[in-house]
Image (spheres, coloured by chain):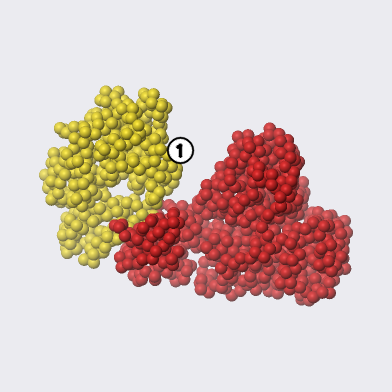
Chain colours: A red, B yellow
């Protein structure tokens, strides 16, 4: 420890700390302006000047290291004068347009003028500021308000890793400029801007900061579930922000959290129940629904629910079906990806969700990011990768079909071929074992069938793997070496894999790889399955599929336990999504309850679903937006958005978060739990359960919830039980290795980097970036089709055709197209086959 | 032209660049042969005891700088030659390169060996197209002759040199900005510590030296410290120095003179007095960032310590003279504009302070200045000095501070008359 004196106080601090850090520990506040704790010190503004005994110059506290025996003075007449003059210099050519500046009232420059008693603008100089930049989407840049603290540049580079912002020009002409192609529109530059330089265009002139009511809650657009403040005025969310230091995401947000929230104010919001398209009372709508569902009970009724609903809502939804309707025909879109991975991980590794907390990605020594683009699917995972890779020098191995952002930053980029995922993961595991780099202690302790694991890996033909994946031996060896030699490894995988034909085999092979490199063995790293939908983990935990009861407990094995607890006999069998679809087509399913899910856009074979849904006898749709689906429904029940109701949601790393009510539901809309509870009461004749009761029951019966609860400032959350497998309890699998047949042109369906599900396509903000779904294509393939950007192409796949505009992208390899599933208009899911997000297609100029 | 011993310029011929052959005939690469017989530590010690001081402007003892370098640390280490000669009034490195470039190559190989930093970069000013050709040719010749490349002169030591041309900004002369520039980043100075010797180019230990400094090293190796120290009179500033004359001199040329010659000798003997027989009023003794000297300083010895004693700096020894008809407010305003323009814009005192000084000097020069402006100017200089992120703003304060100290009457005359007294 280092001992120093600050303003006469003795301070002890670890080596490497700055004077500012040291002062903070004893409650001494040194004024700062360019300092931002979460990035490296800048030392640009010079406001934090302090005196050090024996030094002839003043030093800046933010970037001067504390040294043994240092004697620091932070307050003196000399320092006051220096600081005041610095602030006066900052006011040179500052417009003082505070009345019309969006930062007015929350401006660090205003605050520091007050605190340093700067009451005049004594200095002048030629005004050579760059003109206001209006041409960027969503964000306006006003250079003459800029104090050049570079917080925005550093956040963009160090934390988000997009490095879009940079300083252009020099001297007092210097201004913050942007490489638009690299911008992710996360809005963090706006959040960290101390003045009104970086302005959110959608929020501009909407409210003064003091008019806004802050409701601490979580963002549910993706499963990272960042802690946010919903800021509302007159019952409307005006902006969403997050606080540094007090939130699990340290104040960082993505385009979803920061900009996309305006979809909630869309004029397509449902505000009243509808019966046969006509407004109806809740009483009538619910009575009719209860009646029709009960009438069709048992095998003739089915329900599909959603990762957009809360834990309690999904829990009660499955209970309604199993107890109230005697039907196990329940499923969700988890079927097409997340559930497939969850089943493999549950069986092999006894793992539900991630094996470790999100921040353990950031502390890992090596990273394997496999079959996912976290920058798009779960940006907070990307930030952890940036942290590990940039700050802690972790090695990044990036395995993807496309050359997306992280590919360019990785040490090793493994660009594999469609359908070769199991081969790729298998080859990496084999190489690690062959080199003697496997974590043998971990394997001996935890793996029950070690011999099988060894024989499985020994049986992998490396040449066949090289041929199947299209990845060279050198790259495979390099990647295996990074993963094999690292003390801790984080493995992240996602939708490209889990929604593909390779989901089961690929995840099994990755599980083997995770065992071999000891990813789940320590405090750092871990195995992280990710799925982009907000409460996917909560949906899985709630047991909303025929195979599982709550807590991912196998249905048959846990039936008795739940039957006893529920005082009911549980139904046998049960149809999954495909079975339900076939059941509707054959006429055996007569009533369908859709809660927060839209098969017309979200599900593969969406055209087939559309046809089926027009046929079903009774269709009830509970949702927040009117759309093609609600137009087909017999009854429409308007639900509340996650900003308008209570409940809990579970993040991908098993953090159970409480939602808070920021604004009232739109019109007559009701919290979804109240709707389901009402139906439950009407159908079972029991009292409608309150959210507390549902939650209590879910915690008790689910078996996955611990009582480890924490509070970050005003933000309570609970961790689920930590992953702690018993000795010899893990099993290695023997995934089937297949070589995918060659295809001229394939289509990968995934998530738009600007959209979250289909709801945010109603956001005016995100529409500025991608208004309709764009098909990304390599320059080669575009040339073959004779198309340029904006030209339209019709893609025909196993389930049908879709037409949309193209964009030539360097991310796409020749022979592979990418299209986002989010857009109802493009509706690319009508091309896809169930169980396969990458399909062979024929393309034709439209 | 001069009776003084010529070391760096001994092969200088008008319009000619010394070939490898010429260089070898006059003892070239003998210093390298001698150095390779020694241990790296012995070379560092010799350079330290020679008393050689950095020729880039600061005059820091070269051997001391080398002694900070972790030569024993394993892994990549870099030697960088700072050839970004952008100080206004300074052109001596260019003259040196055009006259006899192998001195630099030999000096760098010796330094690379002494510091165990076998990869070197020559960071050259953007505008020096002619020098870049000269360097490239010298590198190729040295490689072909076995003075550079693998297993140099059979010693087992290998060294590679790369030429990098600057993007062309003054701030690149700051060594950490230069390192950022070499890495392809925006050339903002870096926070110190860590110093380049600890973490410099590509995060590795890096030693940065000026061209003229490195060019002195082979001569020291070949002729020894006693010889080197007798080249000049002052004990604290041994060796010769290239003086680049500019401004109102009759002769604006570059001369190699012993450190410690008087300013009078420089002005009278080498500058040939001032043009049109005018009287000497003032000069910048070492580039635009060195405080002015005036006629009262004509007998001051031009060495590092003597100039510090009178409140100036030897800097690069690029001497710019101003005659009696020159308005020093106008000169200072002009220089300050340069620094304000070349500021990177990173820190407040430099970005906004230099502009404020420009505003004040404009007002005074244009006859709109007041006593309050003079007070404010004093205040600004005090507040910028020692407060900025790097040394650029501090350098910029050199002439402004000297203006206030030496020419206050002239400033007041501007204020009193409401116009520039020089018309």
Location of residue A55 in the rendering, given as x and y in whole percent from the top left corner? 31, 57
User: Which element type, helix, strand or loop, lies under badge 1?
Assistant: loop
Report whether A163 appears left or right of A375.
left
Location of residue A492 in the rendering, given as x and y in whole percent from the top left corner? 64, 49
Quadrant containing the C terminus of chain B in the rendered view: bottom left
Report whether A162 appears left or right of B19.
right
Q: Chain of mark 1?
A: B
Residue found 23% across the figure and 43% down from its top: B317
Residue found 87% across the figure and 63% down from its top: A298
Q: Which residue is mark 1?
A: B75
The answer to whether residue B416 is visible is yes
Location of residue B111 in the rendering, given as x and y in whole percent from the top left corner? 34, 35
Q: Is the residue marked by circle 1 packed among few (<14), some (14-19), or many (20+) residues within 10 Å? A: few
Residue found 59% across the figure and 64% down from its top: A227
Q: Is residue A652 above or below residue A239?
A: above
In front of the other: B374 or B162 = B162
Residue found 25% across the figure and 37% down from its top: B50
């Amino acid at each position: 420890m280092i001992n120093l004196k600050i303003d006469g106080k003795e301070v002890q601090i670890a080596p490497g700390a700055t004077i500012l850090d040291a002062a903070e520990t004893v409650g001494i506040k040194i004024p700062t302006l360019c300092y931002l704790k979460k990035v490296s010190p800048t030392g640009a503004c010079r406001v934090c000047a302090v005196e050090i005994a024996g030094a002839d110059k003043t030093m800046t506290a933010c970037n001067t290291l504390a040294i043994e025996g240092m004697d620091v003075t932070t307050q003196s007449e000399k320092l006051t004068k220096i600081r005041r003059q610095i602030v006066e210099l900052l006011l040179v050519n500052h417009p003082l347009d505070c009345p019309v500046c969006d930062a007015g009232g929350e401006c660090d420059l205003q605050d520091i003028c007050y605190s340093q008693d700067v009451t005049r603008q004594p200095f002048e100089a030629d005004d050579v500021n760059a003109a206001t930049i209006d041409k960027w989407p969503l964000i306006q840049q006003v250079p003459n308000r800029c104090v050049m603290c570079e917080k925005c540049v550093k956040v963009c580079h160090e934390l988000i890793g997009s490095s879009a912002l940079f300083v252009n020009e020099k001297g007092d002409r210097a201004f913050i400029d942007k490489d638009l192609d690299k911008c992710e529109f996360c809005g963090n530059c706006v959040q960290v801007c101390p003045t009104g330089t970086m302005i959110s265009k959608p929020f501009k002139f909407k409210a003064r900061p003091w008019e806004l009511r802050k409701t601490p809650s979580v963002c549910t657009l993706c499963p990272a579930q960042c802690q946010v403040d919903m800021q509302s005025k007159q019952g409307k969310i005006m902006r969403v922000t997050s606080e540094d230091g007090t939130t699990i995401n340290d104040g960082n947000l993505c385009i979803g959290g920061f900009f996309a929230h305006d979809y909630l104010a869309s004029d397509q919001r449902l505000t009243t129940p509808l019966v046969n398209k006509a407004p109806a009372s809740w009483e009538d709508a619910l009575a009719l629904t209860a009646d029709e569902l009960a009438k069709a009970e048992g095998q003739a009724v089915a329900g599909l629910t959603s990762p957009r609903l809360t834990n309690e809502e999904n829990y009660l939804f499955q209970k309604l079906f199993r107890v109230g309707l005697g039907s196990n025909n329940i499923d969700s879109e988890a079927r097409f990806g997340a559930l497939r991975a969850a089943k493999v991980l549950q069986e092999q590794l006894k793992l539900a969700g991630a094996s470790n907390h999100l921040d353990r990605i950031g502390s890992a020594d090596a990273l394997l990011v496999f079959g996912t683009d976290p920058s798009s699917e779960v940006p907070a995972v990307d930030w952890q990768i940036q942290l590990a890779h940039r700050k802690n020098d972790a090695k990044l191995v990036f395995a993807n079909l496309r050359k997306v952002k992280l590919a360019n930053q990785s040490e090793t980029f493994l660009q594999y071929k469609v359908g070769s995922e199991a081969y790729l993961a298998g080859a990496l595991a084999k190489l690690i074992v062959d080199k003697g780099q496997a974590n043998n202690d971990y394997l001996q302790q935890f793996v029950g069938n070690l011999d099988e694991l060894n024989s499985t890996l020994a049986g992998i033909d490396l040449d066949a793997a090289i041929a199947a994946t299209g990845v060279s031996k050198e790259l495979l060896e390099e990647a295996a070496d990074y993963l094999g030699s690292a003390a801790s490894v984080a493995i992240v995988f996602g939708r490209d894999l889990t929604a593909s034909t390779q989901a089961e085999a690929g995840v099994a092979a990755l599980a083997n790889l995770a065992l071999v490199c000891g990813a789940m063995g320590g405090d750092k790293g871990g195995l992280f399955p990710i799925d982009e939908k907000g409460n996917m983990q909560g949906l899985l935990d709630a047991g909303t599929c025929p195979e599982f009861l709550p807590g991912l407990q196998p249905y048959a094995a846990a039936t008795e336990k739940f039957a006893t607890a529920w005082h009911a006999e549980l139904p046998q069998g049960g149809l999954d999504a495909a079975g339900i679809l076939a059941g509707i087509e054959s006429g055996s399913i007569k009533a369908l309850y859709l809660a927060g899910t839209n098969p017309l856009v979200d599900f593969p074979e969406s055209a087939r679903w559309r046809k089926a849904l027009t046929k079903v006898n009774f269709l009830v749709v509970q949702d927040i937006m009117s759309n093609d689906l609600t137009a087909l429904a017999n009854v429409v029940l308007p639900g509340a958005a996650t900003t308008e109701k209570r409940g809990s949601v579970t993040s991908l790393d098993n953090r159970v978060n409480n939602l808070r009510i920021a604004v009232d539901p739109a019109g007559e809309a009701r919290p979804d739990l109240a709707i389901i509870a009402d139906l439950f009461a009407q159908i079972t004749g029991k009292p409608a359960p309150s959210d507390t009761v549902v939650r209590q029951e879910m915690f008790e019966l689910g078996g996955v919830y611990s009582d480890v609860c924490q509070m970050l400032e005003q933000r309570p959350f609970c961790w689920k039980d930590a992953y702690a497998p018993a000795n010899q309890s893990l099993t290695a699998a023997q995934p089937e290795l297949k070589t995918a047949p060659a295809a001229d042109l394939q289509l990968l369906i995934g998530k738009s980097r600007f959209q979250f599900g289909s709801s945010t396509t109603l956001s005016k903000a995100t529409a500025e970036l991608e208004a309709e779904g764009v098909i990304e294509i390599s320059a080669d393939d575009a040339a073959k089709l004779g198309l340029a950007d904006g030209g339209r192409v019709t893609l025909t796949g196993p389930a049908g055709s879709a037409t949309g505009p193209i964009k030539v992208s360097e991310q796409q390899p020749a022979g592979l197209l990418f299209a986002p599933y989010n857009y109802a208009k493009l509706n690319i899911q009508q091309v896809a086959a169930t169980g396969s997000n990458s399909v062979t297609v024929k393309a034709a100029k439209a | 032209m001069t009776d003084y011993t010529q070391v760096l310029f001994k092969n200088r011929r008008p319009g000619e660049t010394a070939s490898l052959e010429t260089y070898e005939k006059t003892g070239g690469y003998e210093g390298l042969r001698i150095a390779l017989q020694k241990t790296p530590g012995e070379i560092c010690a010799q350079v330290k005891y020679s008393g050689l001081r950095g020729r880039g402007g600061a005059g820091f003892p070269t051997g001391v700088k080398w002694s900070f370098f972790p030569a024993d640390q394993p892994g990549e280490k870099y030697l960088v030659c700072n050839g970004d000669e952008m100080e206004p009034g300074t052109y001596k490195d260019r003259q040196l390169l055009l006259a006899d470039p192998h001195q630099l190559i030999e000096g760098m190989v010796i330094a690379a060996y002494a510091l165990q930093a076998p990869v070197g970069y020559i960071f050259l000013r953007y505008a020096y197209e002619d020098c870049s050709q000269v360097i490239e040719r010298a590198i190729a010749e040295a490689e072909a002759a076995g003075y550079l490349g693998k297993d140099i002169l059979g010693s087992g030591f290998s060294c590679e040199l790369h030429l990098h041309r600057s993007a062309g900004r003054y701030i690149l002369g700051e060594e950490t900005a230069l390192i950022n520039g070499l890495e392809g980043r925006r050339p903002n100075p870096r926070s110190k510590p860590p110093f380049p010797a600890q973490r410099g180019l590509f995060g590795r230990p890096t030693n940065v030296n000026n061209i003229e400094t490195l060019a002195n090293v082979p001569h020291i190796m070949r002729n020894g410290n006693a010889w080197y120290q007798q080249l000049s009179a002052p004990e604290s500033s041994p060796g010769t120095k290239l003086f680049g004359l500019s401004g109102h001199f009759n002769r604006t040329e570059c001369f190699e003179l012993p450190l410690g010659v008087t300013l009078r000798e420089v002005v009278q003997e080498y500058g040939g007095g001032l043009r049109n027989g005018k009287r000497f009023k003032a000069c910048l003794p070492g580039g635009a960032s060195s405080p002015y000297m005036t006629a009262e300083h004509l007998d001051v010895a031009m060495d590092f310590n003597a100039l510090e004693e009178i409140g100036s700096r030897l800097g690069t020894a690029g001497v710019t003279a101003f005659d009696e008809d020159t308005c020093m407010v106008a000169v200072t305003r002009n220089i300050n504009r340069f620094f304000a323009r070349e500021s990177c814009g990173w820190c407040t005192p430099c970005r906004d302070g230099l502009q404020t000084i420009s505003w004040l000097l404009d007002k005074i020069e244009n006859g709109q200045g007041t006593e309050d402006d003079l007070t404010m100017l004093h205040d600004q200089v005090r507040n910028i000095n020692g407060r900025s992120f790097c040394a650029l703003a501090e350098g910029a304060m050199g002439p402004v501070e000297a203006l206030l100290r030496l020419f206050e009457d002239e400033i007041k005359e501007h204020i009193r008359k409401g116009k520039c007294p020089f018309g």
